[in-house]
Image (cartoon, rainbow, N blue to C red):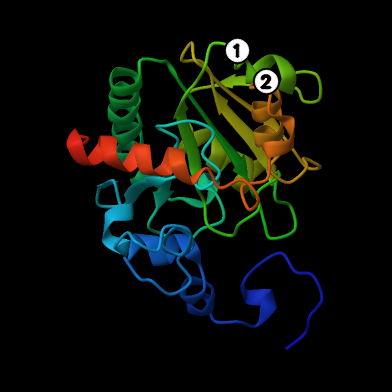
Amino acid sequence: METQASDTIEEFDVDPEDYREICSFCAEIHRRPEHNLLATLLDDVPPADFVLHETERFVVIPGVGAVCPGYVLIVPKAHVLSAGHLDEDHDAEFDDLFTRLEGYLTTQFGRPVTAFEHGAESFRNRGGSCTDHAHIHVFPAATEVDLSSELRKEFALRPVEGLTAPARDQVRRRQRAYLWLRTRSGRAWMCDAPHALSQYVRRILVAQLGRPDEWDWAVFPGTDHIRVTMERFRDAPLR
């Protein structure tokens, strides 16, 4: 097997199933303890408990690197690089799940919701993504969080409707990695992000929260926030 960089799974000469077998998100979706990052961090919790909500094509799980209670990820069951790689049949289901999740988090935690995705176009063009399985960050945002103003200093944001359709346009037509943001006001934005740093939006987020050193989820996993989030979803499930 060649070790040179490549843009697609096929070019790596590796069965796509191999990626799923070692993917933490796939392990969390299928309740497997092996290669399950959440199970490693919270070894007293059964793997099945990490799925906070499930639909036909998506799960909601706690976000490792949580900066606050209620910090969750929407993860597609399909092992794809970003939302831009999802087929059209995911669109309505994602929109419905996001709307219900937004209302739930706002009610449970008393703050408007912010969401973002580092959207990889390929294995090489990653848009700041640090994993090979798509995931959308969703959390109740503190009033000091204003990600769009900071992003505009480096990127040309343009308004979009929703996530999956404009993300698919980025990947299929524009062939560009992207950043997607939905602000506390409910407006959604997207930009080309060919050179975004890994965890770029998280770096901005923790800086605005006054904790600039805590951008790396691998170093600051936020396990206390994860436990609070799981307790809230257990006591008051998302419907």
Q: Residues within 10 Å of mark 1 (few under 14, many from 20)?
A: few
Residues at marks 1 and 2, CA–CA distance in whole angstroms: 7 Å
Q: Nearer the viewer, residue 72 or 164?
A: 72
Q: What amino acid is labelled 2 in the image?
A: Gln
Residue 160 quadrant? top right
Tell me if residue 43 comes above or below residue 208 in the rendering: below
Residue 107 quadrant? top left
Q: Is disc 1 placed on a helix, strand or loop?
A: loop
Circles 1, 2 touching at the beta carbon (< 8 Å): yes
Q: Is residue 150 left or right of residue 189?
A: right
Q: Position of residue 128 (x, y in %)?
A: 71, 45
Q: Residues within 10 Å of mark 2 (few under 14, many from 20)?
A: some
Q: Nearer the viewer, residue 156 or 227?
A: 227
Q: Quadrant of the C terminus?
A: top left
How many marks are shown on the rendered structure? 2
Q: Residue at x 74, y 36 (%)?
A: 213
Residue 210 visible from this viewpoint: yes
Q: Position of residue 188 (x, y in %)?
A: 53, 21
Query: Mark 2 or mark 1, which is nearer the start of the sequence?
Result: 1
Q: Residue at x 73, y 19 (%)?
A: 150
Q: Which residue is mark 2?
A: 208
Q: Residue at x 49, y 62 (%)?
A: 37
Q: What amino acid is labelled 1 in the image?
A: Glu
Tell me if residue 44 comes above or below residue 118 in the rendering: below
Q: Residue at x 60, y 17 (%)?
A: 145
Q: Is disc 2 placed on a helix, strand or loop?
A: helix
Tell me if residue 21 comes above or below residue 186 in the rendering: below
Residue 144 numbered tag = 1
